[in-house]
């Protein structure tokens, strides 16, 4: 059973979710779903539409939240990193922040399914560059 969380949580909610994840034995957290926030950097004429915002503007906040949960859970619950991953470098940043697995959605629409092979192909070089023997060794570092 995986629990997927929103990036727009109050601090009290984060603490409750972390405690529940540990107590209830959730198999993994997915961090994160889309955001209801509208960053000032958005330029699209649709920027004020309601609904969940995904893709690039979600990368920084979802990665920061992932890092926060990895630290508060002390690595005891695996985390699936999602939000704005468009490249191997993005996936690697999620892994370093604490993701054991990475989920793509929006980037597949822009770049197509070949992106998956591109990311998987480029990750070993990034791991070797930083002296990791395995992907697992890089999680949360
Ligand atoms: C059109 C659309 C539909 C989505 N539907 C779901 C859904 O049904 N369940 C879910 O857990 N997440 C859903 N998501 C969230 C994505 O799985 C993902 O967590 C989020 O978009 C952030 O990743 P991304 O920036 O790579 O898209 C949806 C996202 C989009 C853009």
Image (cartoon, rainbow, N blue to C red):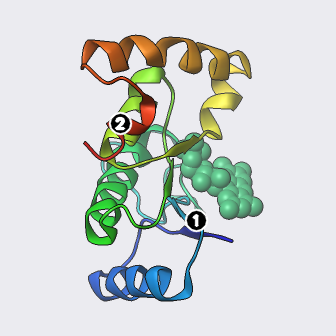
Which badge, 1 or 2, is on the more N-terminal residue? 1
Q: Residue at the location (28% across, 81% down)? A: 11
The residue that mark 2 highlights is: 137
The reply to whether the residue tagged 1 has its Cβ within 8 angstroms of ligand 1 is no
Residue 56's place in the image compared with 61, above or below, is: above
Residue found farthest to the right? 113
Q: Which quadrant of the figure contains the C terminus?
A: top left
Front: mark 1 or 2: 2
Q: Position of residue 132 (x, y in %)?
A: 31, 24
Report whether 118 appears left or right of 132.
Answer: right
Q: Position of residue 125 (x, y in %)?
A: 39, 10
Residue 137's place in the image compared with 4, above or below, is: above
Q: Is residue 113 visible?
A: yes
Q: Secondary structure at mark 1?
A: loop
Q: Secondary structure at mark 2?
A: helix
Judge the density around disc 1: few (<14), some (14-19), many (≥20) Cα neighbours within 10 Å: few
Q: Residue at the location (54% across, 58% down)? A: 34
Q: Position of residue 94 (x, y in %)?
A: 39, 41
Q: Which mark is residue 50?
A: 1
The reply to whether the residue tagged 2 has its Cβ within 8 angstroms of ligand 1 is no
Taking depth in this image into account, of 131 and 8 the one nearest to the observer is 131
Q: Which quadrant of the figure contains the N terminus?
A: bottom right
Residue 55's place in the image compared with 37, above or below, is: above
Q: Position of residue 19 (x, y in %)?
A: 39, 86
Mark-to-mark CA distance, 1 and 2: 40 Å
């Amino acid at each position: 059973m995986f629990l997927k969380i929103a990036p727009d949580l109050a601090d009290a909610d984060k603490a409750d979710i972390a405690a529940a994840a540990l107590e209830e034995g959730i198999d993994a957290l997915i961090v994160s779903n889309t955001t209801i926030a509208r960053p000032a950097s958005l330029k699209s004429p649709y920027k004020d539409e309601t609904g969940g915002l995904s893709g690039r503007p979600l990368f920084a906040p979802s990665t920061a939240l992932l890092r926060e949960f990895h630290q508060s859970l002390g690595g005891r619950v695996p985390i699936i990193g999602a939000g704005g991953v468009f490249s191997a470098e993005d996936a690697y940043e999620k892994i370093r922040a604490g993701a054991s697995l990475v989920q793509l959605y929006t980037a597949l629409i822009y770049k197509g399914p070949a992106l998956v092979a591109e990311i998987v192909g480029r990750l070993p070089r990034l791991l070797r560059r930083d002296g990791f023997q395995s992907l697992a060794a890089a999680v949360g570092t």
